[in-house]
Image (spheres, helix red, strand yellow):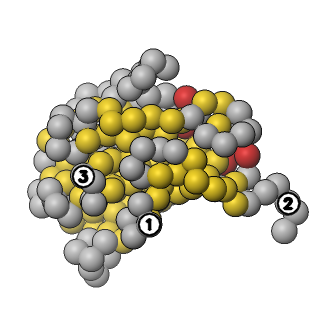
Amino acid sequence: MNCMIRIYRAFTVLTISISCLLTRSLVYLMDRDHRITRTLGTLDGGSSDAEFQSAGGVAFDPESGLLYAIDIYNHRVQAFSSDDGRFVGKFGSYGKAPGGLSNPEAIAIDGKRSHIVVADTANHRVQVRSLTDEFRLVFEVGQQGKGPLEFCNPTGVAIDSERDRILVVDCFNNRIQVLSAIDGTFLSEFGSDGDQ
């Protein structure tokens, strides 16, 4: 079972994925008192709009009021209204070519540039897409490896808007890579394999 929680000023989001023979995933929206106000997805899972085959990371865009949720095994990102939970759109499909996704796991919103950043985990890269231009691919960086701008299953992304940076959890390389949020160039890295 995987569980992820994000806390925003107006609400909390909890995603729960249970993998057995079937993958079942739900995204719960909760109020400030941690009462469930909406449920996104179905217990049976699926590939239709508003269904998940393993919900992953979520991100809230305060500008639009939309909640974006990763749908890992359907290789896409779905968008929902944070007011009523209504499905409003999606982007992504399986592929290795530019713009394709393969088991994405995490997303973050770069509100300064109106971008959404996606950890395209099984493609070993990071995608940056426009929130204002139909999710147009702005740039993507990475390939499998151990050097700068090379990843081995990136599983997390975060935005440092004050310094115009994207931080990428490079899971199996045991490090964080720091990229420019402007054009994706490599800036630095920290972390290493260790026993502590």
Q: Nearer the viewer, residue 9 or 149?
A: 149
Q: What residue did someone put label 2 on?
A: 194
Q: Nearer the viewer, residue 191 or 95?
A: 191
Q: Label 2's element?
A: loop
Are there few (<14), some (14-19), or many (20+) residues within 10 Å of tag 1?
A: few
Q: Nearer the viewer, residue 96 or 18?
A: 96
Q: CA distance from mark 2 to mark 3?
A: 37 Å
Q: What residue did someone put label 1 on?
A: 163
Q: Which of the two marks, 1 or 3, is nearer to us in this view?
A: 1
Relative to 174, is 37 above or below? below
Three-letter amino acid code at disc 2?
A: Gly
Report the residue at 87% width, 63% height from top.
Answer: 195
Q: Which of the two marks, 1 or 2, is nearer to us in this view?
A: 1
Residue 95 image-quadrant placement: top left
Location of residue 88 in the rendering, given as x and y in whole percent from the top left corner: 14, 41
Relative to 136, is 96 above or below? above
Q: What residue did someone put label 3 on?
A: 114
Q: Label 1's element?
A: loop
Q: Label 3's element?
A: loop
Relative to 160, is 166 above or below? above
Query: Which sits earlier in the primary sequence, circle 2 or circle 3?
Result: 3
Inspect this view and state whether residue 12 appears. yes
Report the residue at 42% width, 44% height from top.
Answer: 183
In-image side of 43 versus 66 (left or right)? right
Location of residue 147 in the rendering, given as x and y in whole percent from the top left corner: 72, 40
